[in-house]
Amino acid sequence: MAKHRGLLVTLEGPDGAGKSTQALLLAAALKRRGVRVVLTREPGGSPLSAKIRELVLDPRMRGLHPCAELLLFAADRRQHVADTIAPALKRGDLVLCDRFTDSTTAYQGAGRELGAADVAWINRFAARGLVPDLTLFFDLPVADGLKRAGRRKAGRDRMEASAPAYFGRVRRGFLRLARQEPGRVKRIKVQGRGPDEICAEALGLLETVLGRAGR
């Protein structure tokens, strides 16, 4: 894929870490600064990929094979990049994406134990080689995250119904990514902090990237 003119910033982390809240806060703060922002998410970041989201998160799909799950998320991503992310980057916008390739690495690679090499190849193919300019990793211990996620929703989707051991592997997958790519993946500790304090730290990291890009 040709070098993009915009910026891709992804928000990652385990369930209950508050990514979606932070995405809204960050988008509002950036817009107040005059930055053109496209706020999106995975799965379901375009009309067609929203249909895939319904399928992959449906709690009735309990027999879904882990490899089939991986490929469904990849299909969602390919459509999302084509329909939403690539056009926004071509326009020069800043794309804030709630989950991207790192979630696949953590949830399917580490969580489902599918193996790093296969997941990495599928991620590259599905994302058309696109790598985030910055990844904000909102980190929270598993027990706290599951407790918060449980309070937030009356019913759990198929992913949230997985066993606690699965979520432990997911979190370790995210932590490993942060160690492997410290220049891109920035860990933000969530435990014991309010949304505004967390947003201020995230915004500081974002402004550094914007400054480097001359924005």
Image (spheres, rainbow, N blue to C red):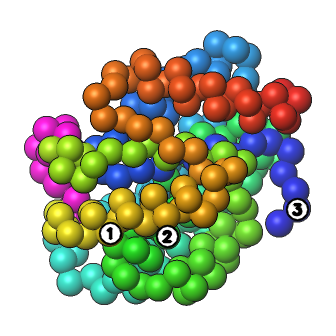
Instruction: Looking at the image, tell me whether mark 3 or mark 1 is earlier in sequence order.
Output: 3
Question: Which numbered tag is attached to residue 105?
Answer: 2
Q: Report the mark closest to the observer, 3 or 1.
A: 1
Left or right: residue 9 compared with residue 91? left
What residue is at 28 percent from the left and 48 percent from the top?
A: 141
Relative depth, front residue between 93 and 214: 214
Q: Which quadrant would the C terminus be assigned to in this image?
A: top right
Position in image of residue 114 (x %, y %)? 42, 85
Left or right: residue 154 compared with residue 169? left
Relative depth, front residue between 197 and 158: 197
Position in image of residue 210 (x %, y %)? 77, 31
The amino acid sitting under disc 2 is Thr
What residue is at 53 percent from the left and 73 percent from the top?
A: 74
Position in image of residue 118 (x %, y %)? 55, 86
Q: What is the quadrant of residue 67 in the picture?
A: bottom left
Relative depth, front residue between 41 and 202: 202
Spatial distance from mark 3 to mark 2, Cα to Cα? 24 Å
Left or right: residue 179 compared with residue 192? right
For mark 2, give the secondary structure.
helix
Instruction: State whether residue 98 appears in this view.
Output: no
Contact check, label 1 and label 2, Cβ < 8 Å:
no
Where are the magenta residues, as a range?
148-160
Instruction: State whether residue 124 appears in this view.
Output: yes
Residue of label 3: 2
